[in-house]
Image: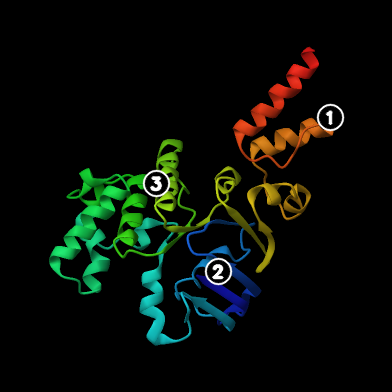
Amino acid sequence: MILLENVYYKYEPEGIEALRGVSLQIRDGEHLALIGPNGCGKTTLIRHFNALLLPTSGKVTVGGHDTNEPKHQADIRSLVGMVFQNPDNQIVGMTVEEDVAFGPENLRLPTVEIKKRVVEALGRVGISELVVRNIENLSGGEKRLVAIAGVLAMQPRYIALDEPTAFLDPAASTRVLKIIDKLHSEGVGIIHITHNMAEAALTQRIVVMNEGRVYLDGTPREIFAKFGMLKQIGMQLPPITELLIKLKESGLPVRTDIVEMEDALVQIRSLAGKFKD
């Protein structure tokens, strides 16, 4: 679906090299987390996925289309929708309905089809009741869901989200994450930038960026098993992984590559049973 071949990107006129030889393949329908320290190139990278940025050198192909070819860029942006960290940067309508309709209107779709897409998109993110609400009266979490609905109305195969739970309270974060998981279960590919390692642990695959390069790439279990390499670049581990590491360091025979709480509890209960015996 998305293929990067030795991609470099330099911001001009500053001359800052944000990507340094990134090669990456993202499969259709995949749920991928993109993590790494601040300034590692995560946001620059995902903006290449829908041709918002074009490589200084190297090649990016999306759905078989080269992003450097202007004739394909509209198709590419319909394949990969982008949700920015700050939803105010992409919300343009006065009301929820107007904003979600904006993308399909620019595709010059029939009015009946536009209305259908608005209703479907709002329903998929669970905010149908907000359809006539003024944007300025929405909470931060509701705005984030409106931004996702606006992208969904374009019917993309992938959605790239830049820290979708940033600055949200726990309840709003949980709601957004549940919607993202639901969309993936419906067949939408998800690329998810996050600093929250517990969120990353819920995905199928994690790509760790550092200094503009791919530092690690694997399943959550594979990535968190390399906790020494993560700590070397200043990354935090999920709390459950930290706990298991401390138990292992204390001499207990536990696995440290577990990423789900239920699996960890099974292991801890097993240890408790052995001590009881």
Q: Alpha-carbon distance for marks 1 and 3?
A: 39 Å
Q: Which residue is mark 1?
A: 250
Alpha-carbon span between mark 3 and mark 2: 24 Å
Q: For residue 95, say whether it is visible.
A: no
Left or right: where 88 falls relative to 19:
left
Image check: 16 left or right of 268? left
Spatial CA distance of label 1 from label 2 is 40 Å
Residue 106: x and y in percent read 24, 73
| Up/down of 21 relative to 235, above or below | below
For badge 3, the amino acid type reads Ile
Marked residue nearer the N-terminal end (1 or 3): 3
Name the residue that disc number 2 marks. 45
Sequence-wise first label, 1 or 2? 2
Neighbor class of circle 1 (other Cα within 10 Å; few <14, some 14-19, many 20+) is few
Coordinates of residue 137 in the picture (x, y in percent): 25, 46
Q: What residue is disc 3 on?
A: 179
Q: Secondary structure at mark 2?
A: helix
Residue at 61% from the left image edge and 70% from the top image edge: 24
**Callout 3: helix, strand or loop?**
helix
Kindly identify the amino acid type of the residue bearing the numbered disc 1. Answer: Ser
Mark 1 lies on a secondary structure that is loop
Quadrant of the rendered image containing residue 51: bottom left
Foreground: 20 or 121?
A: 121
Q: Nearer the viewer, residue 47 or 115?
A: 115
